[in-house]
């Protein structure tokens, strides 16, 4: 509960610090490569190709994710990171020898993506082996920090690195931080959580499906809810760039994203310090409501200040939602199948993102913007509320995303899964299976 504070412990913090540094390094190189490719080719299409290719491996490798449960999680993490580092390492070699071409980045991104799609689920499934059961929510809160840190540190660091020292600089950052992560995981001994639950698990997808259809039903509802939210957030990510550029000018557009990133850092640190409420589903519902309110605030008037405040409020709540959701999976999924289940979460989270981004660009430009023009269909109705003009199309999309988050929150708060997933675990076998294996 929120009061009991078992320390997160040196082992968890060592592994976490290595992973966090690697995530930030990958973000720096991702942004740097994006800037470099855009400057070299002058084409936004290439950026789209690179983004899509980086997220494709998650979907392609998903049938093989049962491997994360067949081998020790620590071994999977080390092997996956070692494979992922080949991408930037080869790109660096080509850059130094002057043979680097744009399509090499696509290949490097793909290789990195394959490694990450095994590394992520294995790392998540390893958390119960590194912290006590009552520290899971705080460990998951801290887990959100590296993503937030990447958003805050990545862009401001990557751009000067590339412009001053060239593409080699960001690739070196990427490779070095990967090695730090591998060394950190190697330095910590941890065995997987022993599973003494009565769930029949032969390590296959069939066993996982059978469990999800039966005892895991409430978690499937949660998976779907979080998938809807991820899809909506992808729309926000595109719309906020359009809106920030319109309200603050190109030079200040990054400030809005920076503010959102800093708010995420604060939210992560708060959930790492205080944990999330024992009624995890309620915590998710309240968090999503705050996200919704933030988005509507950002969209309601054409004001750069309101946009920053709204985005800040929304993104402070995102880590709480993510931590509560991940903790529910740790608490209720049998330890032996957590790699596969976290893999499913990753596939849903990461495949809907690019799809949402693709659709968002089209919807903002061809549907929302024309509707919000002075002569558009919505100018006399919604236009009266949020203002009219081309750029208010993006605002309309953000407002709709906010309302969606609120709707999902209401649905979760009133659904039966709230009772099903109370901290008194789904079945008695869960308490024993989430004990620490030391």
Image (spheres, rainbow, N blue to C red):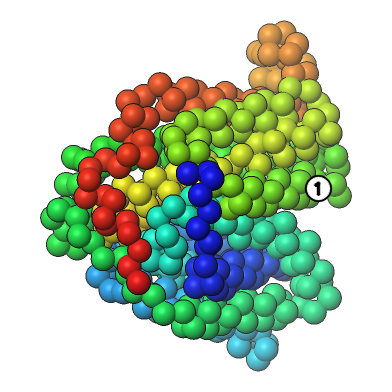
Horizontal and vertical percent for residue 267? Answer: 64, 46
Q: Residue at 73% x, 22% y: name it.
A: 300
Local packing at callout 1 (Cα closer than 10 Å; few below 14, some 14-19, many 20+) is: some
Q: Residue at 78% x, 61% y: name it.
A: 156
Residue 8 in view (yes/no): yes
Q: Can you tell which quarter of the image residue 334 is in?
A: bottom left
Horizontal and vertical percent for residue 106? Answer: 54, 68
Q: Nearer the viewer, residue 434 or 123?
A: 434
Q: Can you tell which quarter of the image residue 151 is in?
A: bottom right
What residue is disc 1 on?
A: 255
Task: Name the side, left or right, on which 15 lies relative to 402.
Answer: left
Horizontal and vertical percent for residue 172? Answer: 66, 81
Task: Name the side, left or right, on which 426 lies relative to 391.
Answer: left
73 relative to 285, above or below: below
Mark 1 lies on a secondary structure that is helix
Horizontal and vertical percent for residue 270? Answer: 64, 48
Give the residue at the far bottom of this rendering: 97
Q: Residue at 53% x, 79% y: name it.
A: 184
Task: Name the side, left or right, on which 2 lies relative to 71.
Answer: right
Q: Residue at 61% x, 56% y: name it.
A: 145
144 relative to 29, above or below: above
């Amino acid at each position: 509960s929120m009061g009991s504070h078992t320390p997160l412990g040196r082992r968890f913090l060592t592994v976490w610090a290595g992973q966090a540094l690697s995530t930030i390094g990958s973000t720096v190189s991702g942004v740097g490569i994006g800037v470099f490719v855009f400057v070299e080719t002058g084409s936004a299409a290439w950026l789209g190709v690179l983004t899509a290719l980086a997220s494709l491996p998650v979907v392609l490798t998903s049938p093989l994710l049962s491997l994360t449960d067949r081998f020790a999680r620590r071994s999977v993490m080390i092997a996956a990171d070692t494979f992922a580092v080949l991408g930037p390492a080869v790109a660096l070699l080509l850059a130094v020898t002057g043979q680097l071409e744009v399509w090499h980045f696509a290949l490097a991104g793909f290789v990195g993506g394959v490694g990450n799609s095994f590394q992520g689920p294995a790392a998540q499934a390893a958390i119960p082996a590194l912290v006590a059961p009552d520290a899971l929510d705080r460990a998951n809160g801290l887990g959100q920090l590296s993503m937030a840190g990447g958003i805050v540190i990545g862009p401001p660091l990557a751009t000067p690195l590339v412009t001053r020292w060239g593409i080699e600089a960001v690739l070196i950052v990427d490779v070095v931080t990967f090695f730090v992560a591998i060394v950190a995981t190697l330095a910590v001994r941890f065995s997987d959580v022993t599973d003494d639950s009565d769930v029949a698990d032969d390590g296959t997808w069939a066993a996982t499906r059978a469990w999800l259809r039966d005892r895991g039903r409430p978690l499937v509802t949660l998976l779907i809810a979080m998938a809807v939210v991820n899809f909506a957030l992808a729309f926000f990510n595109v719309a906020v760039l359009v809106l920030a550029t319109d309200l603050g000018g190109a030079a200040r557009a990054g400030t809005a994203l920076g503010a959102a990133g800093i708010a995420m850092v604060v939210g992560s640190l708060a959930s790492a310090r205080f944990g999330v409420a024992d009624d995890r589903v309620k915590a998710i519902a309240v968090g999503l409501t705050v996200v919704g309110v933030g988005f509507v605030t950002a969209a309601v008037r054409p004001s750069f200040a309101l946009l920053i405040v709204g985005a800040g409020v929304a993104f402070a709540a995102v880590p709480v939602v993510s931590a509560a959701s991940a903790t529910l999976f740790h608490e209720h999924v049998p330890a032996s199948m957590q790699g596969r289940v976290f893999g499913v979460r990753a596939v849903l989270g990461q495949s809907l993102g690019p799809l949402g981004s693709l659709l968002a660009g089209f919807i903002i430009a061809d549907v929302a913007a024309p509707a919000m023009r002075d002569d558009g269909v919505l100018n006399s109705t919604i236009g009266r509320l949020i203002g009219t003009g081309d750029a208010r199309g993006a605002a309309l999309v953000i407002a709709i995303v906010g309302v969606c988050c609120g709707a999902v929150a209401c649905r979760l708060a009133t659904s039966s899964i709230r009772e099903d997933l109370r901290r008194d675990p789904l079945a008695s076998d869960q308490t024993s299976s989430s004990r620490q294996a030391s």
